[in-house]
Image (cartoon, coloured by chain):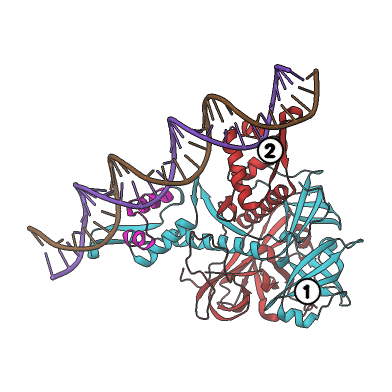
Chain colours: A red, B cyan, C brown, D purple
Amino acid sequence: MDETADRSGTGARGRGRAALIEDGVEFDGRDAALLRAVHEAGSVAGAAAELGRSRARALSRIEALEDAFGTLVERQRGGSGGGGSRLSAGGRALLDRYDRLQAVLAATARVPETVLDGTVAGVDGELADVDTAIGRVRGLHDGTGVSDGTDESEAGGVAPGDAVQVRIGADAVTVYRGDEAVDPDATSARNRRRGVVVGVDAGETVSTVRVAVGETEDAVFRVLITAESAARLDLDTGDEVAIRWKATATRLVG
Amino acid sequence: MDETADRSGTGARGRGRAALIEDGVEFDGRDAALLRAVHEAGSVAGAAAELGRSRARALSRIEALEDAFGTLVERQRGGSGGGGSRLSAGGRALLDRYDRLQAVLAATARVPETVLDGTVAGVDGELADVDTAIGRVRGLHDGTGVSDGTDESEAGGVAPGDAVQVRIGADAVTVYRGDEAVDPDATSARNRRRGVVVGVDAGETVSTVRVAVGETEDAVFRVLITAESAARLDLDTGDEVAIRWKATATRLVG
DNA sequence: CGCCGTTGTATCGGCATAGATACAACCGGG
DNA sequence: CCCGGTTGTATCTATGCCGATACAACGGCG
């Protein structure tokens, strides 16, 4: 989409929103709040009141969700206290699943990333090779995609010659001191580079190291390290380092 | 939420949907498709026709988005060909950002994960220690969260004693042969464990290795490796291995 | 100058969703 | 045996979003 060869560190700021889709029905934050409220109140009526929502709607919403996701709430009419409702195992599982998705999404908004522009050189199964400013890189492409149908764009797979972006999360990259022995896990050298530290942004217990890679050092990787690792490595601007990342943590987008 | 100590490998199946939020306005797949169509058609009118959507609506939608996200489309009324529209730099950037978010979401739906239940032992800045079935584990928590307001749940941070889940993506874990020398990057041993291979699911070029960890071996890690690594490691059920993962790629959820 | 296709702007109707309200059914417990 | 609070179910209304339509404004270009 963009023509520049390198746009590393396009920190994805801003908020995100996630939803799980099954059978055309969306489970979103609103639904998560409802299930959580049912769990706490012990009844759909109480949950609706707590959330300031219509009880009848809340009930029908739960039924709609259950049509798609299976039993979520075990409801009992009559009995002690007039009855009540509680989450089923499936309901708890779905809620947990949503929370994890939300956590991942939250993380991608907070964690820096490295973005490289390139062209697909070859595709082999779930993996693809991409030629970028720093040479050939290997990563995962999303074969069939997880599109919800609202944006087909270029659905399907990638093919050699396609212009794509390569995204590498800062949390997926490891940094070494350049003078250290090569690591023992003789990983394919494909996703390993030498570079120079061009900056360290120290957080409270997590720091972001910026490493320039390539001939002209125009590609800047962001690497997340703990304060512990930061102290051990004692990195400073100008230091020569090696970085490495897993191919399976590298994503083709586009 | 769930009481079981270990629920590793709750593969997050199903579809997902993502949206960027700014100023209360959501940028979703539908909007992405619209911008993409404008880029291709060279006009909002053409884009609307292409998508089978109302031209007036498309225009007002773009204006609503621009109120929140800044200029997205440079429009010209009159002139050669009657005028036209093309994406601004901001529009291209937003589209790319959305694509990356979508790619991450697609990946989390396709990539296996390891989920551990535990309780927070301590919080130190952006990191937190969690006691789980396989001992103490360190990971990132989302301090302020990225909630969109539809589900506050337990907004804010985690605190010692809180019950949480720990999520570790299979793409963030590295596996070694047990008899190999320890890796040179003397990473804190916190997020390293020894285990036994309990299964290998071979894909076309990516395989998922299941590694049982802990006394009772009830916690099963999923590790993604390339076919190349699979051939090199030559793992088989029963093999003793070591696994390692970055604390910065570990997420607390809940 | 007028043609043309586009961007702006306003308005109407349809449709889906949610709230509001009402009422029946249920059942343990006093 | 009735009370109370809950689950079911039906219906009306309000709201918001979208498509459809119509018309004005614009500005190269023939």
- Specify the subunit that label 2 lies on: A
Instruction: Classify residue A20 as left or right of residue A175.
Output: left
Q: Residue at x 79, y 64 (%)?
A: B221
> Which residue does the numbered mark 2 point to in the structure image?
A38
Q: Residue at x 37, y 56 (%)?
A: B53
Label 2 vs label 1, nearer the camera: 2
Instruction: Classify residue A19 as left or right of residue A72.
Output: left
Give the SS element for disc 1.
strand
Q: Nearer the viewer, residue D20 or B116?
A: D20
Amino acid at the residue labelled 2: Val
| Residue range (magenta) | B45-67
Instruction: Classify residue A107 as left or right of residue A148.
Output: right
Task: Measuring from the top left, give residue B18's x and y in whole percent.
Answer: 56, 55
- Mainly helix, strand or loop, the magenta region? helix
> Which residue does the numbered mark 1 point to in the structure image?
B200
Q: Which mark is residue B5?
A: none
